[in-house]
Image (cartoon, helix red, strand yellow):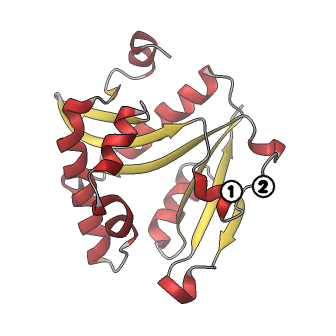
């Protein structure tokens, strides 16, 4: 999808390039810190361990940003390929027809200083618009099961109420459980 088509979907959301690496990194670190204050370290453990995570998402054209007065305040990873761990951990079986035509969302983060203003809702809507324009039939995402407010947000407020799997295999080792959700698009 070209940039003018993306701009028509939502002019506040743009695909990010290498000039946005530091700002993206700052959003991730701020979100990780906020989650850590609540006892959830999964963003700290994964996203903040290496700046290359952000660089790779940008390099592959997967990271999009929400801008408020030209200031990057939110990010979302959008891909038509499932993350590798979906297959490794058997979240989705190879060839599962339900997800052959899906869009996968991850790394949704909004600067804690501007949370509560509908930015994540706009980023998810942007992903849904991309999915529909691309002929996708659903969007898949995952989150920590223990972060109840986030599970409620996705399921009750955003309509991601179809559960693929609840994975507790990491609970004993890392104290983490995940819920994998999807939303059918019409």
Residue 87 circle label: 1
Can you identify the residue that label 2 sits on? Answer: 93
Residue 155 circle label: none
Contact, CB < 8 Å: mark 2 with mark 1? yes
The residue sitting at 83% across, 42% down in the picture is 97
Residue 175 in view = no
Question: 26 or 58: which is nearer to us?
Answer: 58
User: Where 62 sits versus 5, above or below?
Assistant: below
Occupied quadrant, residue 49: bottom left
Question: 42 or 7: which is nearer to us?
Answer: 42
The residue sitting at 68% across, 35% down in the picture is 185
Chain-order first, disc 2 or disc 1:
1
Instruction: Determine the CA span between mark 2 and mark 1.
Output: 6 Å
Occupied quadrant, residue 16: top left
Residue 77 point in image, percent of width and height: 44, 42
Q: 10 Å neighbourhood of mark 1: few (<14), some, or many (≥20)?
A: few
Q: Secondary structure at mark 2?
A: loop
Residue furthest top in the image:
4
The residue sitting at 75% across, 38% down in the picture is 100
Residue 121 in view = yes
């Amino acid at each position: 999808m070209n940039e003018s088509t993306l701009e028509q979907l939502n002019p506040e959301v743009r695909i990010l390039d290498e000039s946005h690496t530091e700002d993206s990194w700052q959003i991730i670190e701020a979100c990780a810190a906020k989650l850590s204050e609540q006892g959830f370290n999964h963003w700290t453990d994964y996203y903040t361990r290496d700046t290359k995570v952000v660089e790779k998402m940008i390099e592959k054209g997967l990271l999009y940003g929400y801008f408020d007065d030209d200031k990057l305040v939110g990010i979302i990873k959008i891909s038509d390929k499932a993350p590798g761990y979906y297959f490794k951990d058997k979240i989705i079986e190879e060839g599962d027809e339900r997800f052959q035509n899906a869009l996968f969302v991850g790394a949704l983060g909004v600067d804690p200083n501007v949370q509560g203003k509908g930015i994540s809702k706009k980023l998810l809507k942007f992903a849904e618009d991309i999915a529909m324009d691309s002929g996708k039939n659903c969007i898949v995402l995952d989150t920590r099961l223990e972060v109840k407010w986030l599970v409620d947000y996705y399921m009750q407020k955003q309509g991601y109420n179809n559960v693929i799997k609840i994975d507790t295999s990491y609970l004993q080792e890392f104290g983490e459980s995940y819920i994998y959700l999807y939303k059918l698009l019409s």
